Image (tube, rainbow, N blue to C red):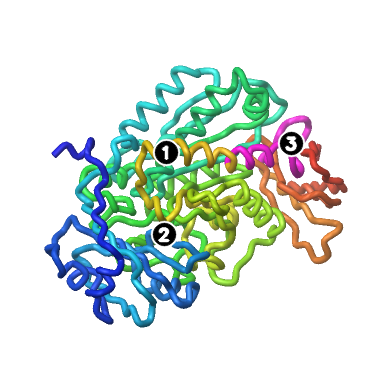
Amino acid sequence: MNIRASRFAILCRPAAAVAAVLTSTVLLAGTAFAHGEQDQIGKSRILTLKLRDFKAQMRELVEGGYDIAGASPGSSTVDIVQRASSQQSFNKEIFGQVIESKIVDTTIAPDVGYKTSAEVDEIIHRLANNYPDLVTVESFGRTHEGRDLWAIRVTSQAKQKAGKPVVFLNALHHAREVMTVEVALDAADYLATNYGTNNEVRDWLDRAEIWIVPMVNPDGSNKVWTEDSMWRKNTSGSDGVDVNRNYPYRWNQCNGSSGTPSSDTYRGPSAGSENETQAMMALVGRIRPVYSISFHSYSELVLYPYSCDGEHVPQREVVEGGGKAMAQLLPSDGGSGKYAPGTSWEILYAVDGGDIDWMYNTHNVIPYVIELNSTSQGFQPSFSAWRNKTVQKVRAAWQYVIRRTLQSGIRGNVTVAGESVDNAVVRVTSLIKEGDVGQMISVKGDGTFHAVLVPGSYKVVVARGERTVEKTVLVGGDLVTLDVAL
């Protein structure tokens, strides 16, 4: 069989017929596959459950180690991926009605239009060759299997006194989420090909750098194409690790991941243990983005930190405001609504060891997760029917964060005796909002700092050793430049 050219096959049964044969307790392997299919490796069932108490039961499913494919908070439904080899059980009297059941042959590769890691390598290097004044490609690490982790930097050679602000886009933390790669590649292509004809794009690339990682998990992607189209993790160890549960901040601290290696949310043996995690952390630490978007699928959501129960970021007005604004820019696949914004714990379930929490806590990045596509489309919708619709829609989100980077807050350069320094700290505190704890920002290696702010009056304190400068700044709708000589 030519697995590369095969289409992703799903055999559906009517929900009523499935419900009729499911007993009160369903083994999502043996019993679920007992009527008409052999219990064999290579088959999985995706069950759509109508939950009675969405938030409470989502928590139970996560803590029970179930593979949650996607969810719709508005309709209180969740999709569960069940392997034929699994012996997990669930009680339908507790969780609610099984409203749909699909059989997936996981030995059949995704739709031929989606990209393998080798194809991504070819595409991004061709883009760099075609636009050498705008696009550079670098390997920022290697995977467990020795594959390069590629980053694309898109910016013009326009000269500025100090370095440019950075917007960071990344895709495919989870191997089966193939549409995310298309969004990342589209962003790079759109920026490069429109620079010469679109004044706004020219302004973006003259004033900012856009860094794009189209495939965080190429080892997992290879497994999706060659062995298992529902594979989620990387391939280190015997069972792989969920890279997006492996970041150090709040690792294994709020029941938002699993310590069982066979689980699809296995967090790894230690915080930051994985090559991909380490490489991403080093890249983010070096480029220090102002905004970040991590593309995932599926569920039509815009998520922002923090992700453990009850936690909110200090900059809620900025972070939540941006998330809600982006959600309004993203119409649902069905056309009747918009994406839903919120923290993971508020609208889905707790997550620990995720990249957006680490980015915000460690580097003061304003980060988001966008969960592409609806539960009707799933992980690997028809390429011809959904690829262009999806990437064109999502442009509104990443373009929004570029605009916000260049239009809001305070940006400056810190110098001593006329030379930029990288060992200063900047604290920005609202003079209007009572009790504001402020932002503490470490100056980048090029001497710059960038604070995203809502309009208002702020106190800015820049310190390096015993040297301190304090200024009052009024922020409106435009980016304020504040260079500080210590």
On whether residue 408 falls in the magenta region, the answer is yes
Numbered badge on residue 413? 3
Is disc 1 surrounded by few (<14), some (14 to 19) or many (20+) residues within 10 Å? Answer: some
Left or right: 314 with respect to 32?
Answer: right
Q: Amino acid at mark 3?
A: Asn
Please give the residue where the numbered disc 1 appears in the rendered image: 387
Q: Nearer the viewer, residue 257 or 182?
A: 182
Please report the residue visible at 33 percent of the width from the left and 31 percent of the height from the top.
Answer: 119
Q: Mark 1 or 3, which is nearer the eye?
A: 1
Gap in angstroms between the C-alphas marked 3 and 2: 43 Å
Q: Whole-percent x and y of residue 228?
A: 24, 50
Q: Whole-percent x and y of residue 388?
A: 45, 36
Where, quadrant-wise, is the C terminus in this rendering?
top right
Q: Mark 2 or 1, which is nearer the eye?
A: 1
Query: Which numbered disc flags the more N-terminal residue, 3 or 2?
Result: 2
Q: Which residues are magenta?
A: 398-422
Which secondary structure, mark 1?
A: helix
Gap in angstroms between the C-alphas marked 1 and 3: 41 Å
Q: Mark 3 or 2, which is nearer the eye?
A: 2
Q: Nearer the viewer, residue 46 or 123?
A: 46
